[in-house]
């Protein structure tokens, strides 16, 4: 059975999605301030590794856990459910723009939802 990673087009699709996703995120008034001062090249690399793994591709993700990676944003910048919702919305819009079918977008959203509590320090 093929994974979401395979169904959306593998590495090339994830690369395209991450670039477009961060264009949307950095233009999003609700959440762009969370990325102030970050090394966006590194951020792209980490996000590509995470999405590749999360979507069922090769596990090349070597970053921190979701809780550890976002703890400072929760504690110091107030990262909450409304911000997480904005990220999910931007991811969905990215996948729509790339022509990903609705059922695969729903699968991607489900995967993203599965890390909500960890990202927000609740699990």
Image (cartoon, rainbow, N blue to C red):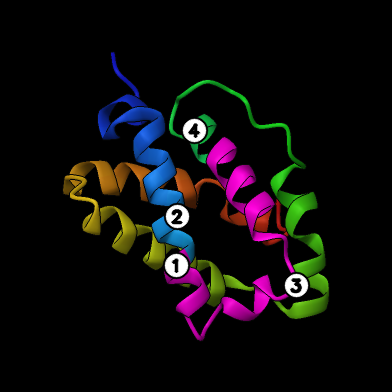
Tell me the CA gap for discs 2 and 3: 18 Å
Q: Residue at 32% x, 42% y: name it.
A: 107
Q: Which of marks 2 and 3 is nearer the N terminus?
A: 2
Disc 4 is placed on an element classified as helix
Disc 1 is placed on an element classified as helix
Q: Is residue 45 one of those drawn in magenta?
A: yes
Tell me the CA gap for discs 3 and 1: 16 Å
Q: How crowded is mark 2: few (under 14 residues within 10 Å), some or many (20 or more)?
A: some
Q: Which of marks 2 and 4 is in front?
A: 2
Tell me the CA gap for discs 4 and 1: 19 Å
The residue stretch that appears in magenta: 23-50
Quadrant occupied by the N terminus: top left
Q: In this view, does 53 lie above or below 88?
A: above
Residue 54 location (% of width, % of height): 50, 35
- Do the CB atoms of the residues marked 1 and 2 lie less than 8 Å apart? yes
Q: Mark 4 points at which residue?
A: 52
Disc 2 is placed on an element classified as helix
Q: Nearer the viewer, mark 4 or mark 1?
A: 1
Q: Mark 3 points at which residue?
A: 37
Residue 97 location (% of width, % of height): 23, 59
Q: Which of marks 2 and 4 is nearer the N terminus?
A: 2
**Tag of residue 19:** 2
Residue 23 location (% of width, % of height): 44, 67
Q: Name the residue under label 1.
A: 23
Tell me the CA gap for discs 3 and 4: 25 Å
* Front-lying residue, 49 or 64: 49
Q: Is residue 44 above or below residue 54?
A: below
Residue extending farthest to the front is 41
């Amino acid at each position: 059975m093929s994974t979401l990673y395979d169904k959306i087009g593998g590495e090339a699709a994830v690369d395209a999605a991450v670039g477009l996703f961060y264009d949307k995120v950095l233009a999003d008034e609700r959440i762009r301030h969370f990325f102030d001062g970050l090394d966006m090249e590194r951020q792209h690399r980490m996000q590509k590794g995470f999405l590749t793994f999360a979507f069922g591709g090769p596990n090349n993700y070597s970053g921190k856990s979701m809780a550890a990676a976002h703890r400072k944003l929760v504690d110091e910048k107030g990262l909450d459910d409304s911000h997480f919702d904005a990220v999910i919305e931007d991811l969905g819009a990215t996948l729509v723009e790339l022509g990903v079918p609705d059922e695969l977008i729903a699968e991607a959203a489900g995967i993203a939802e599965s890390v909500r509590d960890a990202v927000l320090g609740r699990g």
